[in-house]
Amino acid sequence: MTAGAYEIKLDIFEGPLDLLLYLIRKNEVDIYDIPIALITSQYMDYIDAMKSLNLNLAGEYLVLAATLTHIKSRMLLPVSEEDDEEENVDPREELVKQLLEYKMFKEAALGLDRMSILGRDVFSRDHAGEALEKHEQLIGEIGIFELIEAFRRISFDTGRKDLMEIDVEKISLSDRINDIVDELERKGNLTFTDLLEDMGNRRKVIYTFLAILELVKLRIIKAYQAVPYGTIRICLAEK
């Protein structure tokens, strides 16, 4: 099996600017005053993590990585009072403008999306919805980047850094996708760690995680979290 046989392409709303907005939100920093060194470092960590998981990154991710590196280098240069006004412009200004514009259009698109599929977040009381009510109050849906972050924590917390690597032994991603959907049909919802509990089988863990990302991308399942870094619960997106 070649690497291309199990590459996962991220959803249209999970691009480089999404990752940047996620990091800004995660670090609770002002979008108008981005700590460029910190955000660039974390951005590159995510790029490395996604590459190691065979996520098929669009070229825009690398373009933004180069842009962040360039901005970081410009901000390290000393500012002289003799420089003209154009040279003293904040190098982050254009990036901030792009982020604000992208954020506005994304929120508008997601708002229309929710209106057009009003019932997809409604669960029947005898299935997923009832099961979720038995657990802590869920305050927000999470996306692919939060799941990647959770997976990174699990792999490092268990001392299994090799979980971030994939070998070429054959294993069916489609089978893992079907298994997860079947299990959620039976149980209503599962925690993220429930699905990754077989930590002794590296290939199964990796493919389970890739299957979760694919199901999230296709909006077949949704992931929720009550508090940052808290328990992640996964359920079918519609019943």
Image (cartoon, grey):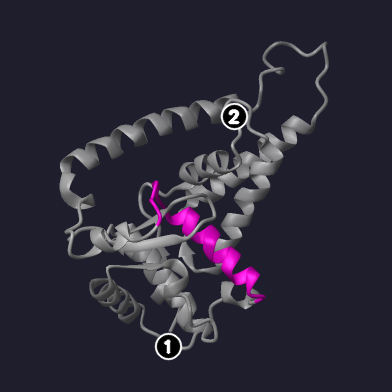
- Residue 6 lies in quadrant: bottom left
* Mark nearer the viewer, 2 or 1: 2
Residue 24, how many percent across, how many down?
Answer: 56, 39
Label 2 element class: loop
Label 1 element class: loop
Asked if residue 191 is among those painted magenta in the image, a careful observer would answer no
Give the farthest residue toward the bottom.
Answer: 169
Nearest the eye: 232 or 145: 232
Residue 3: in sight, yes or no?
A: no
Tell me the residue at 62%/28% (across/down): 92
Decide which of tag 2 and tag 1 comes sooner along the chain: 2
Pointer 2 local density, CA inside 10 Å: few below 14, some 14–19, many at least 20 = few
Asked if residue 142 is among those painted magenta in the image, a careful observer would answer yes
Residue 142, how many percent across, how many down?
Answer: 41, 51
Give the farthest residue toward the front.
Answer: 134
Residue 3, how many percent across, how many down?
Answer: 47, 76
Location of the C terminus by quadrant is bottom left
Instruction: Report which residue position mark 1 lands on.
Output: 170
Location of the N terminus by quadrant is bottom left
Pointer 1 local density, CA inside 10 Å: few below 14, some 14–19, many at least 20 = few
From this view, report whether residue 226 is shown above or below residue 77: below
Residue 84: in sight, yes or no?
A: yes
Q: Which residues are magenta?
A: 136-159
Instruction: Report which residue position mark 2 lands on.
Output: 30
| Residue type of the residue flagged with mark 2 | Asp
Nearest the eye: 168 or 31: 31
Tell me the residue at 54%/55% (across/down): 229
